Amino acid sequence: MASPRLKDSCQESSLIFTRVLAFVSILLIVGFAIWITAVVAGAPWGFAGAIGGATAGVAGFFMLTFGNFFDVRSFTCPNCGHTDRTLQDIGYYNCFNCDTKYHIDAKEALKLSA
């Protein structure tokens, strides 16, 4: 699967919105699941809320620290010097100028074909 290049700022804005929506949804789902589990286990509602909130906070911390969900990166093709903004760690990037394929990682770009 080819990694899509971003043609305008609206696409990047929609990716940012999607990341925020997914982050908030996951935090709410984790917090509510832990809260309901604690209530069923017999904990008072306030204490169960504290447990759910703390667990959701820890999950959010790990998502922000170790996650890369729709990360956008500026990439300059070493062959021809063409620069694009593209998603990293998704499939491969196909340079539209010289037709060279790269796998774009967070730290490096691996050349797949010439």
Image: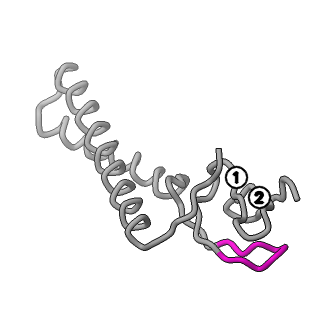
Residue that appears at 62% across and 50% down: 90
Q: Measuring from the top left, give residue 76's x and y in whole percent.
A: 72, 75
Number of labels in the image equals: 2
Q: Is 79 a magenta residue?
A: yes
Distance from Cα at disc 2 to Cα at disc 1: 5 Å
Residue that appears at 31% across and 37% down: 30
Magenta stretch bounds: 75-83
Choose top left, top right, bottom left or bottom right for residue 34: top left
* Labels 2 & 1 near each other (Cβ < 8 A): yes
Front one among 13 and 101: 101
Mark 1 lies on residue: 92
Mark 2 lies on residue: 102
User: Residue type at mark 1?
Assistant: Tyr
Q: Quadrant of the C terminus?
A: bottom right
Residue that appears at 17% across and 38% down: 47
Main SS of the magenta part reads loop
Choose top left, top right, bottom left or bottom right for residue 26: top left
Callout 1: SS: loop
Q: Which disc, if any, is residue 28?
A: none
Q: Measuring from the top left, give residue 72's x and y in whole percent.
A: 54, 65
Drawn side of residue 101 relative to residue 14, left or right = right
User: Residue type at mark 2?
Assistant: Tyr
Drawn side of residue 20 relative to residue 5, left or right = left
Front one among 104 and 51: 104
